[in-house]
Amino acid sequence: MHKEGDEIHVTDTEASGGSKEGVVRWVLAGGLILAVLLMSIVWIIPAMTQGDVEEEATVSGEIRSMDEEADGTDSIVGVPDEGDDAGVDNLEDKTTTRDGISVIEN
């Protein structure tokens, strides 16, 4: 700081009260890189060590396990499969005709 006549001249460093080394920028960049690396490690390592039991918890594992079971159900309860004759006689007993329309009672 120096004085020229009635004017006081101050440098940028003296006016800000600190140094302008850009340390905060490096700390933020390093923290961001570290966070990305740690989150990647937390996600990738368990995915690589995933076993059969954990695989069934995923959507693709659930689909594969349903294909392996292949029990022939179409998710409609009480409706027999195409090749299944069980229940056909039961449906015939409950079928009545009203006004020319076949009605199945529940």
Image (cartoon, rainbow, N blue to C red):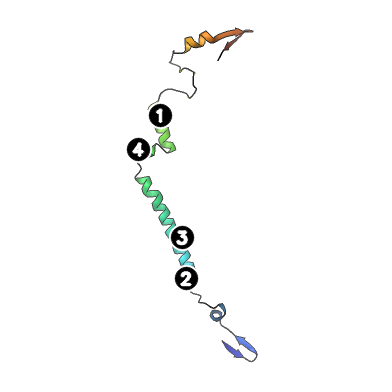
Count of labels in the image: 4
**Residue 12 as seen in the image, left or right of residue 27:** right
Furthest residue in direction bottom, as rendered: 5
Using the rendered view, name the quadrant where residue 102 is placed.
top right
Residue 82: x, y in percent?
45, 17
Q: What element carries label 4?
A: helix
In the image, residue 80 above or below residue 92:
below
Residue occupied by mark 3: 32
Query: As shown in the figure, which amino acid type bears the numbered disc 3?
Result: Leu
Residue occupied by mark 1: 67
Query: As shown in the figure, which amino acid type bears the numbered disc 2?
Result: Val
The residue carrying pointer 2 sits among few (fewer than 14), some (14 to 19) or many (20 or more) residues within 10 Å by Cα, namely: few
Q: Is mark 2 on a helix, strand or loop?
A: helix
Q: What element carries label 3?
A: helix
Residue at 44% from the left image edge and 37% from the top image edge: 59
Quadrant placement of the C terminus: top right
Query: As shown in the figure, which amino acid type bears the numbered disc 1?
Result: Asp
Residue at 46% from the left image edge and 13% from the top image edge: 87
